[in-house]
Amino acid sequence: MHIALVIYGSLDEVSGGFLYDRKLVEHLQQRGHEVTVIPLSWRSYGWSLVDNSSHHLLRRMQRREFAVIVQDELIHPSVFQLNQRLRRVVQTPIVALIHLLRRSQHCSHL
């Protein structure tokens, strides 16, 4: 299976979320899947909104026959409108990857 992983920055970042992403990519590759990382530039929230009108980013996500596009939750300002355009041209499922690294955090709304 060919999987796209869309993130800000690169997998070389040192925070816990990027460690999680690296482990996910390693796990998928060990299982024989091909993973293409699509990195987006770190910018302010407002400037990230500009990515939604990017034809280049849209083409990168539709260029290959991905089985699924996994988007790190942090990139939501860059793709919330772009995903609507993407859905018009490909049937590829789009999945948000949400990291909750604090297992002790209580979620009262669940």
Image: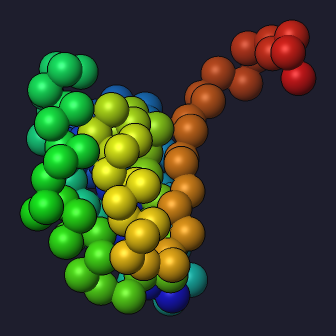
Q: Residue at x 50, y 75 (%)?
A: 92
Position of residue 98 measured from the top left corner of the image (x, y, whole percent): 56, 39
Image height of 78 relative to 101, above or below: below
67 vs 15, left or right, is right
Image height of 54 relative to 48, above or below: below
Where, quadrant-wise, is the C terminus in this rendering? top right
Q: Residue at x 19, y 32 (%)?
A: 48
Instruction: Indicate the colouring scheme.
Output: rainbow
Residue nearest the viewer, comparing 50 with 64: 50
Position of residue 103 measured from the top left corner of the image (x, y, whole percent): 73, 24
Residue nearest the viewer, comparing 78 with 3: 78
Position of residue 61 measured from the top left corner of the image (x, y, whole percent): 29, 69
User: Residue 84 lies in what quarter of the image?
Assistant: bottom left
Query: How many labels sit on residues?
Result: 0
Image height of 53 relative to 105, above or below: below
Position of residue 75 measured from the top left corner of the image (x, y, whole percent): 34, 39
Q: Residue at x 38, y 88 (%)?
A: 65
User: Residue 60 lies in what quarter of the image?
Assistant: bottom left
User: Residue 50 lies in what quarter of the image?
Assistant: top left
108 vs 64, left or right, is right
**Residue 8 shows in the view:** yes
**Residue 18 shows in the view:** no
